[in-house]
Image (cartoon, coloured by chain):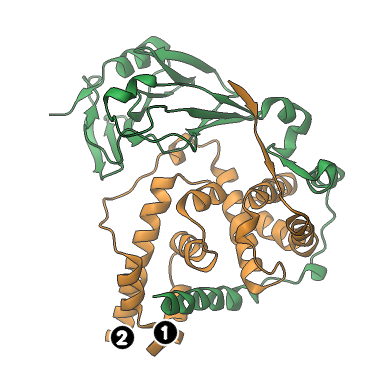
Amino acid sequence: MLAFYMTFIDGEDDKDKFEILYNTYRKRMVYAAFSVLNNKEDAEDAVHDTFIKIARNMKAIGDPESDETLSYVLKAVKNTAINLSKKNTARNRHTQTQPVENISDSEFLDRLGLRENIDEVVKAIKSLNGIYRDVLFYRFAAGMDIKEIADLLGRNKTTVRQQIVRGKKKLLEILENDLRD
Amino acid sequence: MKNTKELFAKALIEAERTDNAAVPGEEEINWEFSEKFCRSMDMLIKKNNRIKLSTRRTVTKSLLAAIVAVLILFTGLMSCAVTREPIIRFVKKVFPQYIDISLSEESAPPVNSIETEYTLAGLPEGFMLDTYQKDEYHVFVIWKNDAEEELVFSQNLLDSTFTMDNEHNYQEVQINGYEAYLNVYPLNSIIKWTDGVYWFTISAPVSDKDEILLMAENICEKN
């Protein structure tokens, strides 16, 4: 069985939103991609490929001109650019991960103590490694599932699942160390 | 939990907002997009109001090549898990420079964690274990020799997505009756294949196709 793989943007609202995204962010996206790739053509390729990924999951985009959407597209293009720069390196295709025990969302959110120290949590997020920060952003701020995040970031689902768990643990570690200091 | 989830989302957005403040505004960035880029983006936005999965570098080629082939149909899995959907389909997205292979959405993997661990039946002379990682979802092993050459074996669940280079010495072969994807380079070769339960990958410092096929055909259960 063969079928053409096409992703449709359903609905006029999403089509309009997609066009707004393009007009609002394309230069900042190419700027971010160029800072990774240092090559004009590759940077434009990364932007183009990112727009395709964004189009596949328009439901994750809320207000196209919000801070959240700016972060969403910049993170997405940066990851696409990084993947593009690694594409010909076979070793990078192997994921090297250590076993990690899960921590549930509810336990994680409880332990963050957000009501008492949201500023501390913001500070801790900023010091978190970008790999974890990205997956936590897409999981909790954009409300995406693992499959959607994996598709957008070009990582496999197992990797994303583990990075979310690791990201939660690292964030808690940072907070606990900060509170101890 | 809903409230704390919202607070955490706010914290994540706030962390990004302060970082993004350093990014120049759209109007401050002096970038002339190439004609090629504008043309392909124009296609994405306007033409038929739909997005075709393609890469911009060779749009026309991609329009032909970006197809999904349903690769493998395992009806025999019924005996492994009678309560599960017995059909497993792999989707191969073909691009000009690479292919993506993933499990189709309607499939149900026969296992959700590594239940049987596999390894290479024999190692070439001089290779010693360097890295061994295993968790619920994958096994990853590297052996090295004195020349620092690496022999890599991995075992993953079927829901993993793989990318293969289809530009350089790419071939589709069979391993024990299953479709396999092979790259033979001058200094090493990579092969990926499935047995219907797991995905396997071997990356070996060999330039001989038969040698890597032999390794793949003879993996065995780890004691």
Outermost residue, bottom side: A116
Q: What residue type is labelled 1?
A: Glu
Q: Which of the labelled discs sits on residue A99, or is there none?
A: none
Q: Residue B218, percent across and down?
A: 26, 16
Q: Which amino acid does label 2 sit on?
A: Leu
Q: Residue A132, percent across and down?
A: 43, 62
In the rendered image, the quadrant that contains the N terminus of chain A is top right
Residues at discs 1 and 2 both on one chain:
yes
**Chain A's colour?**
orange
**Chain B's colour?**
green
Q: Residue B188, percent across and down?
A: 43, 23
Chain that bears disc 2? A
Q: Can residue A27 be seen in the rendering of this structure?
A: yes
Which residue is label 2 attached to?
A179
Q: Rate crowding at label 2 as few (under 14), some (14 to 19) or many (20 or more) other CA atoms within 10 Å.
A: few
What residue do we see at 33% from left, 24% from top? Answer: B77
CB-based contact (under 8 Å), mark 1 and mark 2: yes
- Dot 1 lies on which element? helix
What residue do we see at 63% from left, 55% from top? Answer: A77
In-image side of B153 versus B67 (left or right): left
